[in-house]
Amino acid sequence: MAFNVTFSNTIPFNDPKYRSIFLKVSGDLMVESDNPSLLVPGSEQTVKYVADMANYSIGRTLISMGSVSFRDLSTKLGEFVNVIASDLKSRSITLVGAAFNPIVPDDASQSRISRQDEMEKMTAAPAPATAPAFSQAFASAAPAAAPVSNEPVLMKYCARCGTPSSGTKFCTTCGSSMIKK
């Protein structure tokens, strides 16, 4: 007799671009107990056990994936299902079906991701403007260019962690360079 198990968890994830974030992973599993006398189908204890196993399997799979962006996880759902099925089968439970909700960052992580994306837009080098064509006579009458300063141009915010600049050449929080390249 198959029964439904809903699972939900917020799991830490090391994204290659955004570093440590938390992902909300949830969905439904349809499972059957291979040994109904040991794991009573639909009982609260069995449902909790299966949900905990699913959360454990998903966390273990995320860790083993290596350098994958959270945005690419929707293409990896088959791996989650295979690991969950294998882990459950080793505990006398058969996975009949699985459905995942979209995997998204939690609210705090999403806020940090949005800030980091916005900072990257602000610190990105603008496209060089093309200089207008000058006539030779106008160019010779133009005032001399301002002296070039050897002082480095500093960013207003750290591109790595988002800390506002304190006027130093290195971020006071993470130590990355604050000099515009």
Image: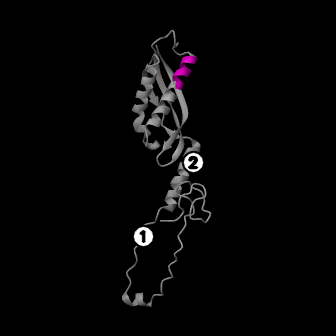
136, above or below 58, in the image: below
Amino acid under disc 1: Pro
Please identify the dominant SS of the magenta region.
helix
User: Quadrant of the rendered structure where residue 89 is?
Assistant: top left
| Badge 2 element | helix
Residue 140 included in the magenta stretch of the image: no
Above or below, 29 against 22 in this view is above
Q: Which residue is mark 1?
A: 128
Q: Which residue is mark 2?
A: 111
List x then y, in percent, for residue 137.
39, 90
Q: Which sits earlier in the primary sequence, circle 2 or circle 1?
A: 2
**What is the spatial separation of the Cα atoms under label 2 and label 1, in whole angstroms?**
31 Å
For the magenta stretch, what is the residue range?
Answer: 44-52
Disc number placed over residue 81 in the picture, else none: none
Location of residue 117 in the rendering, given as x and y in whole percent from the top left corner: 51, 53
Residue at point 48% right, 32% down?
Answer: 60
Q: Secondary structure at mark 1?
A: loop
Give the residue type that dot 2 points to. Answer: Ser
For residue 19, above or below residue 175:
above
State yes or no: residue 47 in magenta: yes
**Mark count:** 2
List x then y, in percent, for residue 180: 50, 65
Tell me if residue 181 comes above or below residue 38 in the rendering.
below
Residue 51: percent from the left, percent from the top? 53, 25
